[in-house]
């Protein structure tokens, strides 16, 4: 089921859909015979939604695959993450909310250290401070190249974003990062004939950058990789016929939402304040993507109890959202982040959907094990949550006569 | 999710994976209200693995499809059996462990009977004895054809393997078997221009064979079909980054394993001895495919009690394997072989996976009905068991940033 097909089935309705993403929601038992973070959490409001709604576990990308934040959210937004792959340069732009435009070419940049022979001795320039990075980016922005605009933006420590804007640019370049020490940075090489102009421009930039940075050891050179253009995908609004907004405070999630054409609202940090913003904008949008980051962060900290608390915090805030009486509410995560693993994982993610006509199943509590027996099953394709929500919002027309 | 995609995600880890295949494991209740073979079997060790691990039923090929041994195992090895089809000539070669090489063209041969008018009167030559077959194959191997090597190998009764080795051969030939009586064997016909040389070679062979066999009624002619070359697939090692070995005593399973590039170890017959061999080779490989045939054989005999006993035998041997503490152990079958049906069937196959981070479900015993409620669900795609095992062995990298 692809976006073109869904788009043909979309019809309009006066219904509201809310997708609440508790980042990294899925977990693992704390030990043999134990409970997961979500199972251990006291979540009377989520349990009530699960009791009245339908539940299951969704696979964000596919069996065994651990999603990054980009693919994880694209899947939730209905874009097959394997088909709709985002280049790393674009992800870097999203991560700092750089306004990438069609035709722009972006790359991830590293400051690095060259030794006296011009060989890379540190691919991360001793992880210089973010402040130092900002000074060097200002220096690099003085470089002028005819026919193109160059943007250099600090990301963090040794990392920056490099963007070219102009006519006839191409992402088909090789990386200049040798991914090894004791060798020279690689030349800028075009993969296709159409990318030769871009390669010349970048080569000129790299040469001038080398001259400017020469005296700034340990950050006396730069490496560029992950060349990518802003993808030309159907927008979320086109695909699903929804006026959609994102209420997220972290740049990466705001970035992915704007990449598919959602409005990204200036979002406060707490969930209570985010729900208040939803109330304020209730008439302006049909679809609200609300993102809560700390569930994932506590998982990455390896702090089981704090992840439980972050989930309980979401549960306590929930009645405020429910007062708005959304026609469809879906609660899930973009991936699992078990405290035991301290990182994203491949495990399917608990999901619940609550709507008037959802055909309630027998799940009584919201948790990994309980969800296995839900109406959505233990391996629901994440990219199909969007059509499921649309149907429950009475926004999909009959297929065929 | 295809092999190329998985290959990109593979990362290395110091973990061991064991796949124990109880051939034909799935079954049917002995009668209304009864238990299946696996449910009836006393399997405390498998039940303990199911209790601590995750379970489900896998679909080897697809809904309603009954797998042959080749496709059944290819699916377990992560090769979509619908995409990765093996020609029958190649299957014949695998079945007798003939060392088929790239560029070889193989066919299934039958000795047949021609009447005085040269018309086929028995497509199986009265099912001559295997001993007689061996004598005739020796006779046929005396045929020399310029520019190619010809190999003739006995399979069983009237069946043999025909292999051509040489430059520029092609599998694009029509069968010479008319699949009917009272007609002549078909001429050797090339389906493509590139196969014309091969057709000429085969026609010359068939003519000489007819002369040699003329006095050997009822086996006074031969028929050739199922032309196939050794496929050029990604190897198991390339696709999954694993040093893999097969521990199987039947030629067909050894053959399928070597077809995908596993090392086939000289395997003893009993499961105890196979497990001892695993222990011996524990440091040399990352992935161990262990095959037990008799569960299927007793199903094909229609002997419910004997199939139960074969399963119990596997269960009793299991602790010996578990002592090695594999990071991931998976137990399943390549298809179902219900004693009631006396043949392979389309029913999903019970599967359990045990690993440190598998996120235990609530399944307490290993059996068809219990597995329905497992974390893998009642219809897990068989070809995705490999990525699932890799993930649980911490051998798949994050997808996207």
Image (tube, coloured by chain):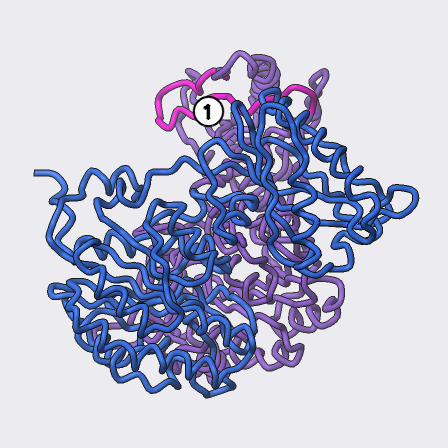
Chain colours: A blue, B purple
B128 vs A221, nearest the viewer: A221
Name the subunit of mark 1.
Answer: B
Q: Tell me residue B365's x, y (percent).
A: 40, 81
For label 1, the SS is loop
Residue B221 seen by the camera: yes
Give the residue furthest to the left.
A401
Q: Magenta span covers which residues?
A: B166-188
Prevailing secondary structure class for the magenta stretch in the rendered image: loop
Please report the residue visible at 61 percent of the width from the left and 66 percent of the height from the top: B17
- x 63%, y 24%: residue: A146
Q: Quadrant of the N terminus of chain A?
A: top left
Residue A95: give x, y in percent of width and height. 51, 53
Residue located 57% across and 53% down the image:
B253
**Residue A300 is covered by the magenta coloring:** no
In screen coordinates, is A230 left or right of B170? left
Q: Choose top left, top right, bottom left or bottom right for residue A292.
A: bottom left
| The stretch drawn in magenta includes residue B178 | yes
Please determine whether, in this image, residue A68 is positioned above or below residue B212: below
Q: Left of A397 or right of it: where is A126?
A: right
The C terminus of chain A - image quarter: top left
The answer to whether residue B96 is visible is no
Q: Foreground residue, B88 or B304?
A: B88
The residue wearing badge 1 is: B175
- Relative vertical location of residue A394 with respect to residue B230 in this rendering, above or below: below
Furthest toward the right, the residue is A116
x, y percentage for residue B295?
Answer: 47, 67
The answer to whether B170 appears left or right of A143 in the picture is left
């Amino acid at each position: 089921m692809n976006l073109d097909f869904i788009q043909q089935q979309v019809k309009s309705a006066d219904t509201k859909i809310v997708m609440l993403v508790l980042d990294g929601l899925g977990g693992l038992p704390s030990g043999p015979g134990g409970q997961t973070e979500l199972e251990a959490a006291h979540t009377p409001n989520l349990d009530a939604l699960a009791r009245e709604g339908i539940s299951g576990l969704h696979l964000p990308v596919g069996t065994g695959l651990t999603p990054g934040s980009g693919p994880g959210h694209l899947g939730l937004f209905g874009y097959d993450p394997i088909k709709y792959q985002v280049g790393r340069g674009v992800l870097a732009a999203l991560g700092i909310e750089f306004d990438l435009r069609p035709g722009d070419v972006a790359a991830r940049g590293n400051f690095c250290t060259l030794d006296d022979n011009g060989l890379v001795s540190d691919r991360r320039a001793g992880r210089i401070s973010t402040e130092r990075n900002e000074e060097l980016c200002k220096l690099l922005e003085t470089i002028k190249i005819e026919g193109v605009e160059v943007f250099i933006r600090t990301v963090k420590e040794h990392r920056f974003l490099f963007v070219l804007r102009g006519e006839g640019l191409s992402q088909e370049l090789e990386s200049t990062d040798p991914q090894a020490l004791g060798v020279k940075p690689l030349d800028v090489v075009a993969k296709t004939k159409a990318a030769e102009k871009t390669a010349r421009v970048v080569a000129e930039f790299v040469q001038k950058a080398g001259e400017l940075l020469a005296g700034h050891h340990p950050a006396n050179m730069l490496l560029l990789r992950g060349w990518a253009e802003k993808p030309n995908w159907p927008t979320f609004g086109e695909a699903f016929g929804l006026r959609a907004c994102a209420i997220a405070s972290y740049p990466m999630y705001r970035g992915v939402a704007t990449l598919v054409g959602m409005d990204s609202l200036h979002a406060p940090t707490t969930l209570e304040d985010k729900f208040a913003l939803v109330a304020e904008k209730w008439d302006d949008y049909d679809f609200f993507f609300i993102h809560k980051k700390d569930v994932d962060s506590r998982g990455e900290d390896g702090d089981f109890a704090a992840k439980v608390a972050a989930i309980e915090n979401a549960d306590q805030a929930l009645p405020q959202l429910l007062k708005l009486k959304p026609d469809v509410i879906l609660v899930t995560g973009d991936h699992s982040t078990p405290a035991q693993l301290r990182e994203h994982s491949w495990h399917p993610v608990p999901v619940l959907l609550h709507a008037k006509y959802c055909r309630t199943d027998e799940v009584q509590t919201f948790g990994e094990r309980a969800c296995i027996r839900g109406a959505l099953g233990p391996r629901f394709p994440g990219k199909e949550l969007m059509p499921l929500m649309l149907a429950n919002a009475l926004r999909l027309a009959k297929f065929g006569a």
